[in-house]
């Protein structure tokens, strides 16, 4: 199981990243658990200074943008 974490304040781009990540994971048949993190102090724990960000199994995969679903599939594999 992959642990997917969306780091963001709840803005429109943060919501887009969460939806796109969910769609990419579902389309890829990945077993996952998604967590949304809105606490700025936790962002710093990951070294993230710009949101939205996607963390997969503790590793920051993208920050500051919303990749396409195809790009997300590659990041999740």
Image (tube, rainbow, N blue to C red):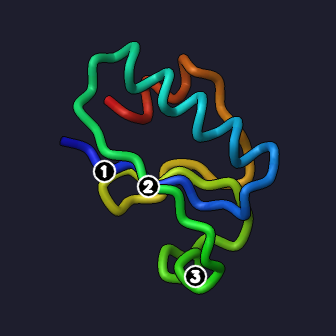
Q: Earlier in the sequence, mark 3 or mark 1?
A: 1
Q: Mark 2 — residue?
A: 35
Quick check: 42 above or below 23?
below
> Residue at horizontal 52%, vertical 57%?
36
Q: Earlier in the sequence, mark 1 or mark 2?
A: 1
In the image, taking residue 36 as reference, residue 50 lies left or right, namely right
Q: Determine contact: label 3, label 1, CB under 8 Å.
A: no
**Residue at far bottom of view:** 41
Q: Could you say where residue 69 lies in the image, as x and y percent from the top left?
A: 57, 21
Residue 53 pos. (x, y %) = 61, 55
Q: CA distance from mark 1 to mark 2?
A: 8 Å
Query: Residue 64 or 35: which is nearer the viewer?
Result: 35
Q: Which mark is residue 73?
A: none
Across and down, in percent, residue 32 comes to 28, 38
Which comes before the other along the chain, label 3 or label 2?
2
In the rendered structure, the answer to whether residue 41 lies left or right of residue 51 reads: left
- What is the spatial separation of the Cα atoms under label 3 and label 1, in whole angstroms? 18 Å
Q: Furthest residue to the top?
A: 27
Q: Which residue is mark 3?
A: 44
Q: Secondary structure at mark 3?
A: helix
Helix, strand or loop for disc 1:
strand
Q: Residues within 10 Å of mark 2 (few under 14, many from 20)?
A: few
Spatial CA distance of label 3 from label 2 is: 16 Å
Q: Which of the 4 quarters of the picture holds residue 35?
A: bottom left
Q: Quadrant of residue 19?
A: top right
Residues at discs 1 and 2 in contact (Cβ within 8 Å): yes
| Residue that numbered label 1 is attached to | 3
Contact check, label 3 and label 2, Cβ < 8 Å: no
Please tell me in which quadrant of the rendered image residue 58 appears: bottom left
């Amino acid at each position: 199981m992959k642990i997917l974490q969306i780091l963001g304040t709840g803005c429109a781009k943060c919501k887009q990243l969460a939806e796109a990540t969910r769609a990419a994971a579902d389309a890829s048949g990945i077993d996952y658990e998604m967590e949304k993190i809105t606490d700025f102090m936790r962002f710093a724990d990951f070294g993230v200074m710009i949101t939205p960000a996607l963390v997969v199994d503790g590793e920051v995969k993208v920050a500051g943008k919303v990749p396409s679903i195809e790009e997300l599939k590659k990041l999740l594999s």
